[in-house]
Amino acid sequence: MAERGANVTTITEFLLLGLPEGRAQQVLCATLFLLIYLVALTGNLLIITLTSLDRRLQTPMYFFLKNLSLIDICYVSVTAPKSIMNSLTNSRSISVLGCASQVFFVFVFASSELALLLVMSHDRYVAICRPLHYEAVMCRGACVRAMSAVWLSGCAYGSLHTTGTFSVHFCGSNVLPLLFCDVPSLLVLACSGEQSLEYAFLIASFALAFSCFLFMVASYVHIFLAVLRIPSAHGRLKTFSTCMPHLVVVTLFLCAGSVSYFGTTDDSVSPWNLLMSVVYSMVPPSLNPLIYSLRNKDMKEALGKLLRGQLSAKL
């Protein structure tokens, strides 16, 4: 609902029009989103359980993986349940507070995930390129401090962008052509000239995210160069198969987010932008458990041990 003043629109709720009009398509979307959400929850909860119960998985790498799974659960839970509910009930409204909450938590968890992936790339660099210094560099205190910095940076980014977005006045309609609230679509509705600060925040954030990506690439280049010196072909293949998917998922995350955010220039969104918004908000949390952990030998052994223990308990 929107109430108009002279030029400013007092908006009490937004309408999310990213869903298709047909009822059958809406149910199909709800089913697809629910499946993706359940896959993300199951995979990430399994990783948290295994890394918490198995004593062999109490290393820095698995400590970071457990936190990545926690972030992924929170991240996908910001948008997926609301999208599923809207699809099933044919409801399209979201309150201003609900919209602001989505913007805040999407930025908190997305930026926290990117920061954590940066930390994880450094962890792998130290483990492979400086193995004799690994225990000293990646000690428990350093890991805790790194995770504290990850969460604090996420909260800072979330607060910055939420404040920058909702400090503007809205002069347009209350229609958002996506499945959830995002900053570019909201800024399209803002009064002319008031979006400059948040656009500057977005450009600066993208530049920082791209810098983090370049740092990750540099870390993996050093890792690959070190791996090429490994005499065992099996050892080289194992390391490459571990590191390459990391870069793939980060690239997918950044590219999809960039297309979705910087491709929104008016009050309509192409199907491609809509697809990219789904990709960067739902797909990485679903893929991360498979890419980072469940292909891992230690994780498979821990899972087998857990299943055998459950079976023995029942017998």
Image (cartoon, rainbow, N blue to C red):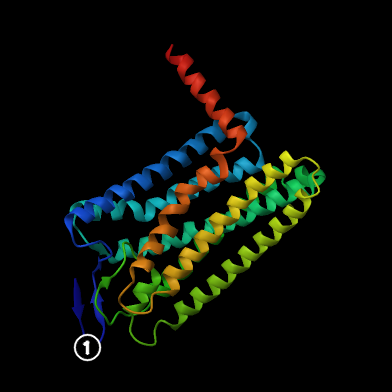
Quarter of the image with the N terminus in it: bottom left
What residue is rendered at 38% in x and 75% in y? 264
CA neighbours of label 1 inside 10 A, class few (<14), some (14 to 19), many (20+): few
Q: Is residue 4 left or right of residue 61?
A: left
State the image coordinates of residue 72 (x, y, percent, origin top left): 47, 49
Locate residue 100 relative to residue 310 in the image: left or right. left
Give the residue drawn at x 42%, y 39%: 42
Callout 1 secondary element: loop
Quadrant in which residue 271 is drawn: bottom left
Q: Residue at x 63, y 68 (%)?
A: 211
Q: Quadrant of residue 260 in the image? A: bottom left
In the image, is residue 52 above or below residue 26? above
Tell me residue 176's x, y (percent): 29, 70
Relative height, residue 236 to residue 117 (above, below) = above
* Amino acid bearing label 1: Ala
Which residue matches tag 1?
Answer: 6
Asked where in the image residue 259 lies, by quadrant, the reply is bottom left
In this rendering, the count of numbered labels is 1
Q: Return the x and y of residue 225 as percentages of the image width and height.
A: 77, 54
